[in-house]
Image: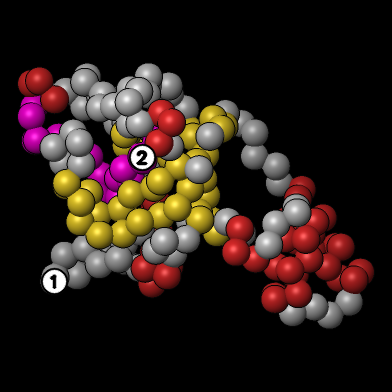
């Protein structure tokens, strides 16, 4: 788990990658993935896919309501890396916190379930070793890696989630 400051985005890496790819000659995406995994000491099964919270649902919202994207459905039970903001709760639950695409504060005592949580809120589950601990709020952008789970689930905080991330 890593917290990223807003100003630390590196713009030259994509340019450098394109330059190196052009020098190396033709390559298939499969070979690039294998080479990248080998450099990082990972097997293909250990690779991490990137997804953003904004890629969870199709837009515009259709007549049936929110529909998950093919990308989200394709990453079910796979390791993913995702960034977002920790939801500030008055009463955090043990072993669980929420990640949203924008900063959000909840006033559970005053508002109850009538809150402003975005639809693409991800419920993040702590590893088993930390399942009995409540995560203290920390502002800023978070980058998390874990296994993505999709499906309705009643959470410890009384909410029903559709997407969950089980941290590594």
Q: Magenta-highlighted stretch: main secondary structure?
A: loop
Q: Is residue 133 left or right of residue 154?
A: right
In the visual, does 144 lie left or right of 118?
right
> Where is 59 relative to 155, above or below?
below
User: Where residue 159 sits: x, y (%)?
Assistant: 16, 41
Please provide percent x and percent y for residue 145.
Answer: 51, 45
Asked whether residue 100 is in view, the answer is no
Residue with the mark numbered 1: 63
Badge 2 marks a residue whose secondary structure is: strand
Q: Position of residue 88 (x, y in %)?
A: 30, 25
Q: Nearer the viewer, residue 161 or 138?
A: 161
Please name the residue shown 54% across and 30% down the image: 3
Q: Secondary structure at mark 1?
A: loop
> Is residue 155 on the magenta stretch?
no
Above or below, comparing residue 27 to residue 40 in the picture: below
Mark 2 or mark 1: whose residue is earlier in sequence: 1
The way the protein has been coloured in the rendering is secondary structure
- What is the count of numbered marks? 2
Is residue 113 rendered magenta in the image?
Answer: yes
Farthest right residue in view: 23
Q: Residue beneath label 2, please?
A: 125
Q: Is residue 116 above or below residue 154?
A: above
**Residue 142 at what x, y percent from top left?**
49, 34
Residue at the spot 8% in from the left edge and 29% down from the top edge? 112
Q: Residues within 10 Å of mark 2 (few under 14, many from 20)?
A: many
Question: Which span of residues is magenta-colored?
Answer: 111-126
Task: Name the residue at 71% across, 46% down.
Answer: 11
């Amino acid at each position: 788990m890593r917290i990223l400051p807003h100003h630390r985005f590196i713009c030259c890496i994509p340019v450098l990658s394109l330059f190196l790819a052009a020098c190396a000659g033709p390559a298939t995406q499969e070979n690039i993935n294998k080479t990248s995994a080998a450099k990082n000491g990972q097997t293909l099964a250990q690779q991490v896919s990137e997804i953003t919270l904004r890629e969870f649902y199709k837009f515009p919202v259709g007549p049936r309501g929110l529909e998950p994207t093919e990308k989200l459905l394709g990453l079910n039970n796979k390791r993913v890396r995702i960034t977002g903001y920790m939801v500030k709760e008055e009463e955090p639950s043990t072993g669980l916190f929420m990640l949203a695409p924008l900063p959000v504060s909840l006033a559970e005592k005053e508002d109850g379930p009538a809150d402003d949580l975005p639809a693409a809120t991800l419920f993040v589950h702590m590893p088993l070793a930390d399942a009995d601990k409540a995560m203290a709020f920390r502002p800023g952008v978070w980058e998390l890696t874990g296994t993505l789970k999709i499906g309705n689930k009643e959470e410890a905080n009384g909410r029903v989630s559709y997407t969950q991330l089980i941290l590594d």
